Image (tube, rainbow, N blue to C red):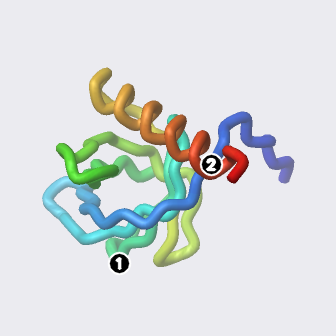
Amino acid sequence: MTRVQRALFRISIAREGTVRRGSEVAACSITELTTKGMGLSTALPVSQGDQLEVTFALTDGAPICCHILVTHTVPPRLGGRITSISAAHDSQLAQFIDQHIATTLSPI
């Protein structure tokens, strides 16, 4: 199996949220983030190919809501590609990641 090299900068974060598949809802912890996907942990049993709705707060402001396609799972962890996100939430996500990178990579 050939792995595709990631073209995006992945950041480690710790944010609490919820994950929904149909009528099933569970708590989740977002652990990694890019502008195109995320890694998270949840007790909700999921399989590769599942579509999930994920809601979480990046800051104290309004929560981010997006849909992901599960690309890999090692329970309770999973990774997914963002398949649907509003333009406003996409912009907030990109701005948050840019600010995070700027503050963590800037010289002291």
The extreme right residue here reads: 2
Query: The disc labelled 1 sits on which kind of residue?
Result: Ala
Disc 1 secondary structure class: loop
Q: Which mark is residue 70?
A: none
The residue that disc 2 covers is: 10
Disc 2 secondary structure class: loop
Q: Where is residue 25 drawn, in percent x and y?
A: 19, 65
First of labels 2, 1 by sequence position: 2
Mark 2 and mark 1 in contact? Answer it, CB < 8 Å. no
The mark total stands at 2
Q: Nearer the viewer, residue 68 or 94?
A: 94
The answer to which image quadrant residue 45 occupies is bottom left
Residue 72 shown left or right of residue 62 in the figure: right
Q: Where is residue 105 drawn, in percent x and y?
A: 68, 47
The residue that disc 1 covers is: 43
Q: Nearer the viewer, residue 26 or 56?
A: 56
Q: Nearer the viewer, residue 23 or 10?
A: 10
Residue 72 shown left or right of residue 21 in the figure: right
The residue located at (60%, 43%) in the rendering is 101
Q: Mark yes or no: residue 80 visible.
A: no
The answer to which image quadrant residue 8 occupies is top right
The extreme top residue here reads: 87
The residue located at (37%, 47%) in the rendering is 51
Q: Where is residue 44 drawn, in percent x and y?
A: 33, 72
The residue located at (53%, 46%) in the rendering is 100
Q: Is residue 98 above or below residue 73?
A: above
Q: Where is residue 94 drawn, in percent x and y?
A: 46, 32
The residue located at (22%, 53%) in the rendering is 60
The extreme front residue here reads: 108
Query: The disc labelled 2 sits on which kind of residue?
Result: Arg
Residue 34 shown left or right of residue 66 in the figure: right
Q: Nearer the viewer, residue 105 or 88?
A: 105
